[in-house]
Image (tube, rainbow, N blue to C red):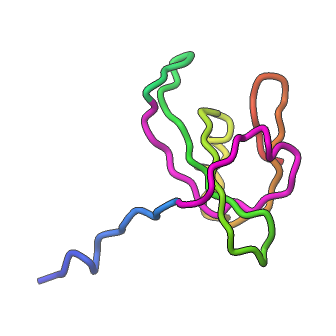
Amino acid sequence: MERFGDFAVTAQTLEGRKVEIDSILNKEIIITGFRIGASKFKENGNDKYERIQFKYEKESEETFVFFTGSEVLRNQLKEYETHIPFITKVLKKNRYYTFS
């Protein structure tokens, strides 16, 4: 008989100091994890949000998180999840955020 711990995947805890997304725009960061959750706010049919964990430098142990409802960032995170951790910048293009 199998043990639960042998097959169950526990969700990664995303901890870190919370920062506003605008404070990291155009700065190089290292994405270390993310989680998509249900938002209590619904905007343009979007009822999801992302909690994104990152570091500023490879050597740094301090982690940070920011929250966003960006559908573009959500799609990029899901598409490139297997590449985490990765180095990127968050850019604001007109009315949306994107990784570059």
Q: Is 79 on the left or on the right of 98, as rendered?
A: left
Residue 57 is situated, as x and y percent measured from the top left of the image, at 80, 69
The outermost residue toward the right is 26
Task: Look at the picture and state if 40 lies above or below 36.
Answer: above
The outermost residue toward the front is 17
Within the image, what quadrant is residue 59 found in? bottom right
**Residue 73 magenta-highlighted:** no
Q: Nearer the viewer, residue 40 or 17?
A: 17
Q: Residue at x 81, y 55 (%)?
A: 88
**Residue 16 magenta-highlighted:** yes
Q: Is 92 on the left or on the right of 15, as rendered?
A: right
How many labels, in total?
A: 0
Q: Nearer the viewer, residue 77 or 33?
A: 33
Within the image, what quadrant is residue 92 found in? top right
Q: Residue at x 83, y 50 (%)?
A: 89
Task: Look at the picture and state if 39 lies above or below 89.
Answer: above
Q: Nearer the viewer, residue 3 or 62?
A: 62
Residue 25 is situated, as x and y percent measured from the top left of the image, at 83, 43
Q: Is 27 on the left or on the right of 54, as rendered?
A: right
Task: Look at the picture and state if 54 lies above or below 92.
Answer: below
On the rendered image, what quadrant is the N terminus found in? Answer: bottom left
The outermost residue toward the left is 1
Residue 29 is situated, as x and y percent measured from the top left of the image, at 79, 58
Please report the bounds of the magenta region as a residue range. Answer: 15-39
Q: Nearer the viewer, residue 40 or 96?
A: 40
